[in-house]
Image: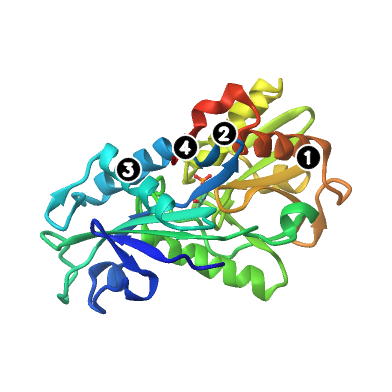
Amino acid sequence: MKKTEFIWLDGKFMRWDEARVHVLAHALNYGTGVFEGIRVYNTPDGPAVFRLKDHVRRLLDGCKMMGIEPVFGGKKYGFDEIMEAIKETVRKNEEVDYVKPCIFLSGEEVGLNPVNVPVSMAITCIFMGAYLGNAGTEGAKLITSSWHRPDNLCSPAGSKVNGTYVASCLAKREAIRQGANEALMLNASGHVAECTGENIFLYKNGRIYTPASAESILEGITRNSVIEIARDMGYEVVEAEVSRTQLTTADEVWMTGTAAEVVPVTMIDGRPVGDGSIGEVSKRIHTMFHEVALGNVPEYGRWLDYVN
Ligand SMILES: Cc1ncc(COP(=O)(O)O)c(C=O)c1O
């Protein structure tokens, strides 16, 4: 990851090293924040943020779930103000391919009570490159984590709540320790849910399957894009319960996420997926997704928000 020069904090640009919060910030101690991860692509018409409106909607839905009022530095921020702040932060920095807005409880007090704790928002831009390194092109190895994907009785599974990511971090550590790139997380019912920061798809007998939204997944924006792209390409896509057996015996498996993009999976728990090579369907979808994100497919132009 490469740093950039400016971070937007509560309505002001701060230099990277000066963007600080107090050690007692509520979110630091109790995970009370919501965030987004958003990609910026260099298109023929300049830098464009991919599906910015959908990310801002999910961020504000997350605030609603957490009971967080988006008021920073005494000013209330709605959808339009947050859209503009994100675009402004991208414009202000150089070499940006990923933006991470985070709305969180700040303050300087000890105690769980989140009511009336001040709220802050930070918008950080970085150059991330390929989140999963070579696995993005060569195929990823997964393990099944011993940690479950937190369900809606633990925290709002459909929102990117900071504290919920403890389970993802534990699972990711497990994967790295075992020499894998990513961890698959099952839900409390033992069905396939998703990976630590990606949704999951499989292809078998001519159909594409992905866990349904009620399976304690984050409804990924890349997931949604890939479903639409795949249907437009003529594939049948089924959103349903997915069992471990279905995933292990699939012809092809791939992950989707803003950071990871579309990543083929070639090994799960030491067993090859299909014949262990990258399948044709995942290759086609990977290629099409990139063309769309890079602004080369006019039918999907509505997904790009140009910053200039
Ligand atoms: C737990 C989890 N699942 C899935 C995803 C993929 O979501 P999206 O495509 O919106 O980035 C993410 C990434 O943000 C995630 O953190």
The mark nearer the N terminus, 2 or 4, is: 2
**Dot 3 or dot 1, earlier in sequence:** 3
For mark 4, does the 10 Å Cα neighbourhood hold few (<14), some (14 to 19), or many (20 or more) residues? some
Q: Nearer the viewer, residue 35 or 52?
A: 52
Neighbor class of circle 3 (other Cα within 10 Å; few <14, some 14-19, many 20+) is: few
Rendered residue at 36%/48% (across/down): 88
Q: Going 60% across and 38% down the picture, which residue do you hit?
A: 293
Q: Looking at the rendering, which quadrant does residue 92 occupy? A: bottom left
* Residue at the disc numbered 1: 283
Q: Which residue is mark 2?
A: 225
Image position of 88 with respect to 182: above or below:
above
Do the CB atoms of the residues marked 3 and 4 lie less than 8 Å apart?
no
Question: Which numbered dot is residue 17?
Answer: none
Between 291 and 148, the residue placed more toward the observer is 291
**Mark toward the viewer: 2 or 4:** 4
- Tell me the SS state at disc 1: helix
